[in-house]
Image: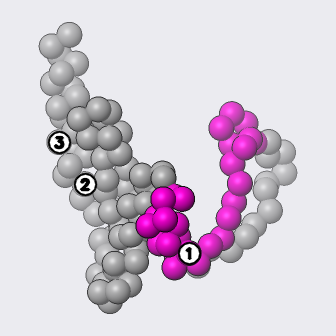
Amino acid sequence: VLVDPFTSPGGLQEAVRVYLARGLHRAPHPDGFVAEDEEVDMGVSWRPLDELVEDVYAGRLHNPSMVSGTLALALAIAQDRLDSLRPADAPWPARANQLARDAELDGLG
């Protein structure tokens, strides 16, 4: 796990867990796959991390999950912490707390 951001704290309840995927490679779409909805206009781009970091600082990268994941990865590399990242199934107490609060608020309505 690279980072666990809340994309719009105080405004929305969306929590995201950003993982570091390793060993990825291009693969063909499965038979019968048809892009739908928002996927229709989504492209795939493989970019070096240094370019992504530059895009963050230049104001060309805006997606909060992408920005936080990019900077978290750059920092993990700079601090030689890749081997000490949290495992994919690491506890996520902030998310659990958020879900409990949501349930509490639902009970008030």
Query: Disc 1 marks which amino acid?
Result: Glu
Q: CA distance from mark 1 to mark 3?
A: 36 Å
Residue that mark 3 sits on: 97
Q: Position of residue 78 (x, y in %)?
A: 35, 86
| Residue ID at (39%, 69%) | 71
Residue that mark 1 sits on: 51
Q: Position of residue 24 (x, y in %)?
A: 62, 74
Q: Quadrant of residue 1?
A: bottom left
- The disc, 1 or 2, on the residue closer to the chain's N-terminal end is 1
Going by the picture, which residue comes out furthest to the front?
Answer: 58
Residue 3's place in the image compared with 49, above or below, is: above
The foreground one among 99 and 64 is 64
Say whether residue 33 is left or right of residue 95: right
The crowding category of the residue bearing disc 3, from other C-alpha atoms within 10 Å (few below 14, some 14 to 19, many at least 20), is: few
Which residue range is magenta in the image? Answer: 35-61
Query: Disc 3 marks which amino acid?
Result: Asn
Q: CA distance from mark 2 to mark 3?
A: 9 Å
- The disc, 1 or 3, on the residue closer to the chain's N-terminal end is 1
| Residue ID at (15%, 13%) | 108
Q: Quadrant of residue 15?
A: top left
Disc number for residue 92: 2
Label 1 secondary element? helix
Going by the picture, which residue comes out furthest to the right?
Answer: 31
Q: Position of residue 96 (x, y in %)?
A: 22, 44
The crowding category of the residue bearing disc 1, from other C-alpha atoms within 10 Å (few below 14, some 14 to 19, many at least 20), is: few
Say if residue 19 shows up in the picture: no
| Residue ID at (79%, 54%) | 30
Q: Nearer the viewer, mark 1 or mark 3?
A: 1
Whether residue 52 is in magenta: the answer is: yes
Whether residue 53 is in magenta: the answer is: yes
Say if residue 34 shows up in the picture: yes
Label 3 secondary element? helix
